[in-house]
Amino acid sequence: MIKRICIFCSSSDKIDKAHFDAAEKIAFELTKAGYVIVCGGGSHGLMGKIIETSIKNGGYVIGVIPEFMRTVEWDSKEVNELVVVEDMRERKKLMIENVDAVIALAGGCGTLEELMEVITLKRLGKFTKPIIILNTNGFYNYLKELLDKMIDENFMNRQSVDIWKFVDSPEQVLDAISSSAPWNSDAIKFAVV
């Protein structure tokens, strides 16, 4: 059975090298483990590094990109399969379709928006797979604090802590996927606090 992993991450080329190193390691580990990688299909930043690393090591990458980004040539020419969609909404939907897990690497508002949508979908039982947040150099510390605060102040229930898993290194990602708490499609029954 083909295993698929969705990765949300930055398209910036101007970020700290530590994030590129983490992207390279996770792409290598996933490729070695036989995962197909589904990502945003961009040629820059961490997306570009993930695609380059996976392809170089014999992996298979599916890129999903809106037409308007392809028009300005943001799309990677290296992906095995490029799916061109109409808009960002369709992109997010296709990226998480039939995947075994989602991994979020460091990124800007687009990455954060993708991550928060998939967390929301899981909270409502519309997505049931593991969500792993790679917290390279503490990048997501404030997000972790905010999510904890949402739970502490009853904006989300206590079960919500099982929606995501934060890890500090790429080497922890595969274990985090396999040890993630099971999630059920009836989660909507306990979504309201």
Image: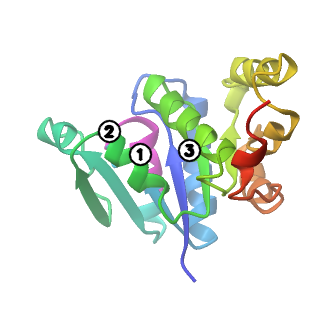
Q: Are marks 2 and 1 in contact (CB under 8 Å)?
A: yes
Mark 1 Cα shell of 10 Å, populated few (<14), some (14-19), many (≥20)? many
Q: Secondary structure at mark 2?
A: helix
Q: Main secondary structure of the magenta part?
A: helix
Q: Earlier in the sequence, mark 3 or mark 2?
A: 3
Q: How far, Cα to Cα, is label 3 from label 2?
A: 22 Å
User: Is 36 left or right of 77, judged from the image as shown?
Assistant: right
| Frontmost residue, 129 versus 144 | 129
- Figure label count: 3
Q: Amino acid at mark 2?
A: Met
Residue sitting at x 76%, y 56%: 183
In whole angstroms, how far apart are the C-alphas of marks 1 and 3?
Answer: 20 Å
- The residue that disc 2 covers is 88
**Image: magenta residue range:** 43-53
The answer to the question of whether label 3 and label 2 lie on touching residues, with beta carbons closer than 8 A, is: no
Quadrant in which the N terminus is drawn: bottom right
Residue type at tag 1: Lys
Residue 136 vs 90, above or below: the answer is above
* Residue at x 87%, y 20% (from the top left corner): 152
Quadrant in which residue 55 is drawn: bottom left
Q: Secondary structure at mark 3?
A: helix
* Residue at numbered disc 3: 23
Tell me which corner region of the image, top left, top right, bottom left or bottom right, holds residue 110.
Answer: top left
How far across and how far down the image is residue 23, in percent? 56, 44
Would you say residue 58 is visible in this rendering? Answer: yes
- Assess whether residue 50 is covered by the magenta stretch: yes
Residue corresponding to mark 1: 92
Question: Foreground residue, 21 or 45?
Answer: 45
Q: Amino acid at mark 3?
A: Ala
Residue 53 pos. (x, y %): 47, 56
Classify mark 1: helix, strand or loop: helix
Q: Residue at x 82, y 38 (%)?
A: 161
